[in-house]
Amino acid sequence: MFDRLYKSIIRLLIVLWLSLGLLLPTSALPAYAMGLDTVGPWKTEANTLPGTLAAATSVVYNGYVYSIGGFDASHNTTSTVYSAPLNPDGSIGTWTTESNALPQHRVNSNSVAYNGYVYVMGGYDDSLVDTIYGYDPSFVDTVYSAPLNPDGSVGAWTTELNALPVTLSNPATVVYNGYVYVMGGFDGTNRYSAVYSAPLNPDGSVGAWTTELNPLPQVRSDLNSVVYNGQLYAIGGFDGTDVVSTVYSAPLKPDGSVGTWSTDANDLPHKSAGATSVVYNGHVYFMGGSDGFGFLSSIYSAPVKPDGSVGTWTTESSALPQALFLAASVAYNGYVYVMGGYNGSTILDTVYSARFLTPEPDPGPSPNPVMPVLSNTYVGLNGDTNRFLTPETDSAPDPGPSPNPVMSVLPNTDVGLNGDTNIIVGVVALIAIVVSVSVLAVTKKKRK
């Protein structure tokens, strides 16, 4: 009798173990903790850009993506602004050429979107000469702003009274908690380590710029930057001598100032400038670019740790469909979009999209889920002509008390019927069964 009961309990134990997923406890871990990809297969969107375009800057806001400036396949610089809706299924709707173009042509400018406005900063407005690598730019310090209307259209542009402190191209730019940050860059002669910040006023104007006391540890142009959970990241780029793989990070203080920069222990797997980056749901993504010898299609991702440092970088299996340099990218509502760029032989109008495989954050009741936005700029490939794409982050109009207006922390993947709750219940049940089996075994032994 006890033999039969003992065997029945063992069979029940095995069934419970398998049904609760406890045989593979790693199923409760985030994808990155198991070394899995976090970007799905890439799709070529049916709605391409209205024209070939590289070195544009782009933002996403309230369900619309915007592509601003850049140059075309004939190397003509543009002031054109395109917009397109992002559909719930992740596809891109039809592009519209906005009636309100930039006041002047811009290449290698940076942009951010915040609280119903888009801002375009710096860059140059001269046409390229001869080839993609030869140009004679006129660098500018101009800052433009325009309202983003509820229907997705762009309002009239204003030239802000508070220009950048210096003429600047190829920096990195982000927006966070009511402040815009511009770091690094190139003025045609010098590269910078300076970091500038300015408040964005409720009426959409830009306040006075401050030169932060904590500059980048080294000069950089053609770098990428993202911001997440109050931490600012500067990734890769060109130091005036070589393309680099370094990752820097610094905290953003409540008063808008930048804290001390740290050199992260985890460099990029490979050096790159002219890449494009986004941050989404606790992960940083660094895509494409050039290492100074060729153009890249690789995608690297890394988790942001609770202490603000960057975890180990993973080379995603789903690389870009082709090598891309000077492309633009944004992330929104569970998808990443990469637009235009240069593949080593031609300037493209292609738009690619891919779904993030990490669990999506709960957007709550807000009509404007806050997603990282990316602004891109141009970087040539040799020496001083190196140029890049910069990432920016779109913030909600009212971030409320949350310390992270950009994104929530990555939740664990679901297990069984109710994620971690099922694991706890399963463990308790398992302990109870083991105790019961042990008692029965001892009882049986004594009776013998």
Image (cartoon, rainbow, N blue to C red):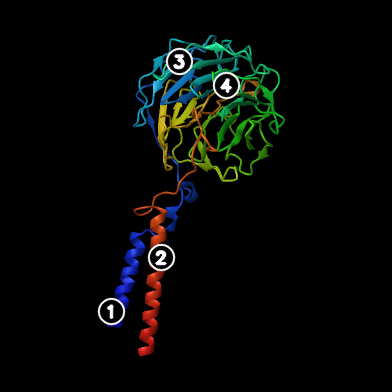
- Residue 238, by quadrant, is top right
Say whether residue 69 is visible. no
- Label 4 packing within 10 angstroms: few (<14), some (14-19), many (20+): few
**Mark 4 vs mark 1: in front:** 4
**Mark 1 vs mark 2: in front:** 2
- Label 2 packing within 10 angstroms: few (<14), some (14-19), many (20+): few
The C terminus, quarter of image: bottom left
Counting residues from the start of the chain, the first of labels 4 and 3 encountered is 3
Q: Amino acid at mark 2?
A: Val
Where is 248 relative to 173, above or below? below
Tag shown at residue 428: 2
Q: Farthest residue in the bottom direction? A: 448
Q: Amino acid at mark 1?
A: Arg
Residue at 32% from the left image edge and 77% from the top image edge? 6
**Mark 1 vs mark 3: in front:** 3
Secondary structure type for disc 1: helix
Tag shown at residue 4: 1
